Image (cartoon, rainbow, N blue to C red):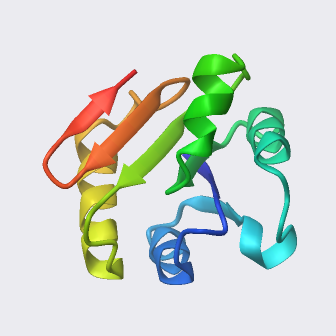
């Protein structure tokens, strides 16, 4: 799987993904302050799943009907790196092969597909 990670996600999460051998483009490293629209366009062009904390992507996908290649929106009360990585690892393991082209909302105790 290939990911594009929004700049609002900690770099340590990106480092964990890379350590797991995922192909990761981190917006904060190369394209800081890229608009949300441009991030979604780049994700589609490069066949990447977006990882973000930014609820604005829900607006773009559901109300403005922008294309995407998959979005993992994290809504954690405790966004500490360890908890974020734990939830991400659970989702990647449990739903392997089911994350492409879907919008997934990940909270402390729930994973919702839309």
Question: Which quadrant of the figure has residue 6?
Answer: bottom right
Q: Answer left or right for 47 relative to 23.
A: right
Q: Answer left or right for 114 relative to 36.
A: left
Residue at point 35% right, 53% down? 75
Question: Residue 62 appears at what percent x and percent y?
Answer: 58, 20
Which quarter of the rendering shows the N terminus?
Answer: top right
Q: Answer left or right for 66 relative to 34.
A: left
Image height of 80 relative to 98, above or below: below
Image height of 49 relative to 114, above or below: below
Relative to the observer, which residue lies in front, 17 or 40? 40
Question: Residue 83 appears at what percent x and percent y?
Answer: 25, 72
Q: Is residue 6 in view from this perspective? A: yes
Q: Residue furthest left?
A: 109
Q: Is residue 69 in view from this perspective? A: no
Question: Residue 73 appears at what percent x and percent y?
Answer: 45, 46
Residue at point 34% right, 57% down? 88
Question: Which quadrant of the figure has residue 28?
Answer: bottom right
């Amino acid at each position: 799987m290939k990911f594009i990670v929004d700049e609002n996600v900690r770099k340590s999460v990106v480092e964990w993904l890379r350590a797991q051998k995922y192909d990761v483009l981190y917006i904060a490293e190369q394209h800081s302050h890229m608009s949300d629209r441009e991030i979604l366009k780049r994700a589609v062009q490069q066949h990447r799943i977006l990882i973000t904390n930014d609820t604005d992507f829900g607006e773009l996908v559901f109300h403005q009907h922008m294309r995407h290649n998959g979005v993992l929106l994290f809504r954690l009360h405790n966004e500490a790196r360890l908890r974020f990585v734990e939830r991400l690892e659970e989702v990647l393991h449990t739903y392997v092969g089911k994350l492409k082209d879907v919008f997934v909302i990940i909270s402390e105790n729930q994973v919702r597909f839309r």
